Image (cartoon, rainbow, N blue to C red):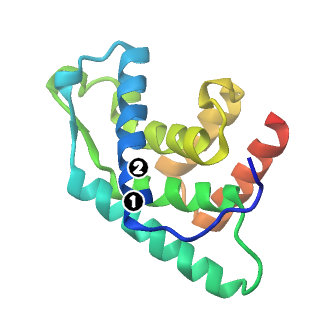
């Protein structure tokens, strides 16, 4: 997988990412043994997050003329936008499960790792995963910082 990301994001790629994001959510629910009828996905919020990520990618590219952004930078952008748009809600049966309440963060990280970086997020060190979830849910973090985090994840997963 090339290190640099082709930032030409078209409608076909966005639709493919939407399908892959849904698949990641299903995989997380199956792994956690959560009933699918308790997980609700807003396609509008998901599309909004992906569209904003596309715009952010364009803006990042404009700040770096002639230098394509890295896959890790794209992973940071996607993770940031998907967590902020929070397209997933959980039902009453999962409302007391802290992991279920953080499903938007888990899904965004897993999606970016799997689809953009080609890494299985379940292979990340538990302490790093825990800290990343904490920063995304409780602290201020931006796309650029997430890009650096994903650069390190990529580097150490090789």
**Residue at x 64%, y 66% (from the top left corner):** 6
Q: Position of residue 116 (x, y in %)?
A: 60, 48
- For residue 66, which quarter of the picture? bottom right
Quadrant occupied by the C terminus: top right
Q: Nearer the viewer, residue 19 or 95?
A: 19
- Asked if the residues shown at circle 1 and circle 2 are in contact, with their CB atoms under 8 angstroms apart, the answer is yes
- For residue 10, which quarter of the picture? bottom left
Element type at mark 2: helix
- For residue 105, which quarter of the picture? top left
Rounded to the nearest angstrom, the CA distance separating label 1 from label 2 is 6 Å
Residue 127 against residue 142 in the figure, above or below: above
How dense is the environment of label 2, judged by Cα within 10 Å: few (below 14), some, or many (20 and up)? few
Element type at mark 1: helix
**Residue at x 65%, y 67% (from the top left corner):** 144
How dense is the environment of label 1, judged by Cα within 10 Å: few (below 14), some, or many (20 and up)? few
Q: Position of residue 154 (x, y in %)?
A: 76, 44
Residue 16 against residue 69 in the figure, above or below: above
Q: Which label number is shown at residue 12? A: 1
Q: Position of residue 92 (x, y in %)?
A: 15, 26
Q: Nearer the viewer, residue 11 or 46?
A: 11
Residue 127 against residue 131 in the figure, above or below: above
Going by the image, does 18 lie left or right of 5? left
**Residue at x 69%, y 29% (from the top left corner):** 124
Q: Which residue is mark 2?
A: 16
Going by the image, does 118 lie left or right of 42? right
Q: Position of residue 115 (x, y in %)?
A: 56, 43
Going by the image, does 71 lie left or right of 156? left
Q: Residue furthest top?
A: 33
Q: Which label number is shown at residue 68? A: none
Going by the image, does 49 lie left or right of 59? left
**Residue at x 61%, y 24% (from the top left corner):** 122
């Amino acid at each position: 997988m090339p290190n640099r990301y082709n930032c030409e994001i078209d409608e076909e790629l966005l639709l493919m990412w939407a399908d892959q994001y849904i698949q990641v959510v299903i995989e997380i629910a199956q792994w956690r043994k959560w009933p699918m009828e308790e997980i609700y996905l807003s396609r509008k919020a998901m599309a909004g997050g992906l569209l904003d990520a596309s715009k952010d990618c364009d803006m990042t590219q404009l700040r770096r003329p002639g230098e394509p952004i890295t896959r890790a930078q794209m992973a940071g952008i996607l993770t940031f936008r998907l967590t902020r748009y929070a397209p997933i809600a959980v039902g009453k049966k999962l409302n007391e499960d802290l992991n279920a309440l953080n499903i938007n963060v888990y899904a965004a990280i897993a999606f970016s790792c799997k689809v953009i970086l080609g890494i299985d997020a379940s292979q990340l060190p538990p302490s790093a995963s825990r800290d990343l979830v904490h920063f995304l849910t409780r602290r201020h973090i931006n796309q650029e910082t997430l890009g650096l985090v994903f650069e390190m994840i990529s580097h150490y997963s090789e």
